[in-house]
Image (cartoon, rainbow, N blue to C red):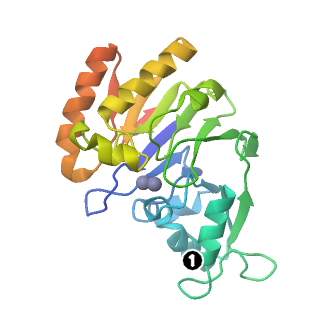
Amino acid sequence: MNIQLLGVHSCESQNTKLTSLLIDDILVVDAGGLTSSLSFPAQQKIKAILLTHQHYDHIKDVPAIAFNFAMWNAAIDIYSILPVYETLTTHLLNGKLYPKFLEQPQGNPTIKFTIIEPYQIERIEGYNVLAVKVNHSVPTVGYQITSPDGKVVFYTGDTGPGLADCWERIAPQLLIIEASAPDRFKEFYESRGHLTPTLLKQELSSFQKLKGYLPQVVVVHLNPGLEEEIKAEIAAVAEDLNHPISVGYEGMQLRL
Ligand SMILES: [Zn+2]
Ligand SMILES: [Zn+2]
């Protein structure tokens, strides 16, 4: 399994893209920094997009990728939970802001949307995909993705603390998890369903206690203006846990 981090930030600029991962060139998770990160030929290889939740920084490029697939007279599969489907069809792809790509062209719409249920394994392009609820300000799922050769990654999406139930349900070799801001903003970020390094440390300790191991850990969803502080605090957490933690960056390649 080859995972490319397309976007790892919570604010967009020339050098920082919104959250998006690309797996084996065909599977995308979250579409914040999708079209802005990939050439047209690379976009054409994409078979399916999984969305963790409805927030703009995770769905931003859905209209853009739909326009491109419409240009190629092709269709793309999108998978997510019901609230994301409702948000997209009501507010974004509604015929006012953007075309109704979930209905048009009639009979063969550009976006084929599948509503998934948490805790039921979905078979997508040969991968087993398990959606697991996490703790954010709107309904959100993380995805455990298992490749045909048995490699396992879990990506949390946006989440605050309290992930013990989530950890019970998964067993990844690689954990991609958020750390949005440094600890001096802990209360504010925690109240909005995000993690800071100290909260991440608690969640990783809980993982280790429940599962008896720690996976490879990469943090994403970084506030670009606070990144150096986040990095320093993540390094301290890694030392406390005696376990390496990588800070993600645009273009980072992870191999399993
Ligand atoms: Zn969010
Ligand atoms: Zn976000």
Q: Quick one: label 1, few (<14), some, or many (20+) residues within 10 Å?
A: few
Q: Is residue 250 visible?
A: no
Quadrant of the displayed image that contains ligand 2: bottom left
Residue 2 position within the rendered picture, expressed as x and y whole percent measured from the top left: 51, 37
Quick check: 74 left or right of 58? Answer: right
Residue 229 appears in view: yes
Residue 218 percent coordinates (x, y): 39, 33
| Point 75% across, 44% down: residue | 122
Circle 1: residue type:
His
Instruction: Identify residue for label 1.
Output: 91
Q: x, y (%) of residue 119? A: 72, 39
Query: Which residue is most to the bottom?
Result: 96
Residue at left 34%, top 15%?
241
Q: Secondary structure at mark 1?
A: helix
Percent coordinates x, y for residue 219 in the rendering: 37, 37
Q: Please state if 116 lies on the left or on the right of 8 as rendered.
A: right
Q: Residue at position x 33%, y 52% from top? A: 9
Q: Quadrant of the N terminus?
A: top right
Figure check: 98 above or below 187: below
